[in-house]
Image (tube, grey):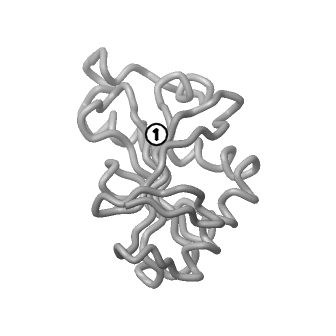
């Protein structure tokens, strides 16, 4: 089933509404999946529209705020696994956001059902070189990073 939503665009339904699109991420075009939680009837909550619209309006500025928490998460994960002491090629020393950008790729934006989180909720998913199986996920509430972990935290 396909709908043409005036905010999200043309979406297909396969247990979740989605479409593939491109978005600029730090000056590079990223091919992503836009995923919107919703029932098969294609009706979305006002808060879902607000979350997505606010994300898009603030996207250029917001990108800058994503990298420091991701870098902190990476350093913590690397330390927890002991790779700050013992070398592991999958977890190299990354000290700057420029180095980090070479190791992550934005692959998805998800808009959860309204009311699950307090405020405008968005999930961002990334592929990352250090964990190809689980990837990286960020949950944003009111355009601020509230949780970082594997990609499934965005569900």
Give the side of residue 72 with respect to residue 98, left or right. left
Give the side of residue 8 with respect to residue 27, left or right. left
> Within 10 Å of the Cα at label 1, are there few (<14), some (14-19), or many (20+) other Cα atoms?
many
Quadrant of the image occupied by residue 82: top left
- For the residue pair 136 and 85, the one nearer the viewer reads as 136
Q: Residue at x 41, y 61 (%)?
A: 17
Q: Residue at x 40, y 68 (%)?
A: 37
- For the residue pair 91 and 27, the one nearer the viewer reads as 27
- For the residue pair 14 and 133, the one nearer the viewer reads as 14
Percent x, y of residue 112: 43, 69
Q: How many marks?
A: 1
Q: Quadrant of the N terminus?
A: bottom left
Percent x, y of residue 29: 63, 30
Whether residue 139 is visible here, answered yes or no, is no
Give the side of residue 63 with respect to residue 41, left or right. right
Q: Residue at x 32, y 48 (%)?
A: 150
Percent x, y of residue 138: 46, 54
Give the side of residue 114 with respect to residue 153, left or right. right
Q: Residue at x 43, y 47 (%)?
A: 125
Residue where numbered disc 1 is placed: 107
């Amino acid at each position: 089933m396909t709908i043409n939503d005036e905010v999200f665009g043309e979406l297909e339904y396969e247990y979740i509404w989605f479409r593939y699109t491109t978005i600029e991420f730090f000056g590079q075009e990223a091919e992503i999946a836009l995923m919107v939680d919703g029932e098969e009837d294609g009706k979305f909550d006002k808060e879902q529209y607000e979350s997505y619209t606010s994300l898009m309006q603030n996207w250029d500025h917001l990108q800058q705020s994503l990298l420091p928490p991701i870098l902190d998460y990476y350093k913590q994960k690397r330390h927890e696994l002991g790779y700050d002491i013992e070398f592991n090629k999958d977890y190299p020393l990354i000290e700057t956001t420029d180095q980090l950008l070479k190791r992550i790729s934005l692959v998805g934006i998800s808009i959860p059902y309204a009311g699950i989180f307090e405020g405008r909720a968005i999930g961002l998913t990334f592929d990352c070189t250090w964990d190809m199986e689980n990837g990286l996920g960020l949950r944003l509430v009111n355009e601020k990073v509230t949780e970082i972990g594997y990609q499934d935290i965005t569900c």
